[in-house]
Amino acid sequence: MIGMYSRIAALAGLAVFNTHAAFAGADDYEFQPVSAEIKNGVGAELSIRLVDKRTGKTVPGAIIFRTQLDMSPDGMGEMLAKHEALPPGEPGIYRYKADITMAGGWAFKLQAKVPGEPETVEGSVAFTAKD
Ligand SMILES: [Cu+2]
């Protein structure tokens, strides 16, 4: 029975997704970590990939205009890390340098303007800082 219910739920989810796919929107985009593991320390580099979920392709040219790096994944949302953008690397990859002060889970939250997308795209990318 559980199997059947989850299958129904999956189908319902699919139907919602298909309806949505007819209209482009901010949900069509996702920010992902290039590597989820970062260095615990000053000048740690983190790279984020912006993906168009409809095509699976990376999206270059986004303007990331608001960012916050905090430890909300470890229940320390008020613990912030200083960071700054680095020059872009490959198209669709956005790089930052951060001063990480504690090992553990960090979330890089951002808002971006994506070419051809009127809605603001928001993302939260999880990283784990290791010594
Ligand atoms: Cu912390």
Image: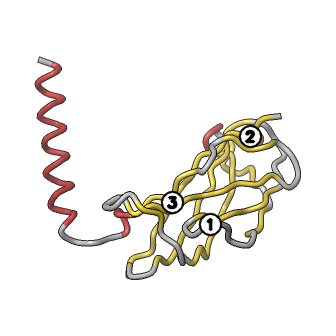
Furthest-top residue in this view: 1
Q: Please, what is the three-letter code of the amino acid marked with disc 1?
A: Glu
- Marks 2/1: CA–CA distance: 23 Å
Judged from the image, the quadrant occupied by ligand 1 is top right
Quadrant for residue 22, please give it: bottom left
Q: Are marks 3 and 2 in contact (CB under 8 Å)?
A: no
Q: Amino acid at mark 3?
A: Gly
Dot 2 falls on a residue whose secondary structure is strand
Residue 9 figure quarter: top left
Rendered image quadrant of residue 127: top right
Mark 2 is on which residue type?
Ala
Position of residue 70 relative to residue 58, above or below, is above
Residue 125: % across, % down: 57, 52
* Residue ID for mark 3: 123
Q: Nearer the viewer, mark 1 or mark 3?
A: 1
- Front one among 52 and 4: 52
- Tell me the residue at 54%/69% (across/down): 111
Instruction: Tell me the mark number nearer the camera, choosing from 2 and 1.
Output: 1
Q: Which residue is mark 1?
A: 90
Looking at marks 3 and 2 on the same chain, the residue that comes earlier in the sequence is marked by 3
Residue in front for this viewpoint, 92 or 18: 92
Looking at marks 2 and 1 on the same chain, the residue that comes earlier in the sequence is marked by 1
- The answer to whether residue 129 is left or right of residue 75 is right
**The one of 89 and 3 positioned closer to us in this rendering:** 89
Numbered mark located on residue 129 in the image: 2
Instruction: Say how the picture is coloured.
Output: secondary structure
**Residue 80 image label:** none
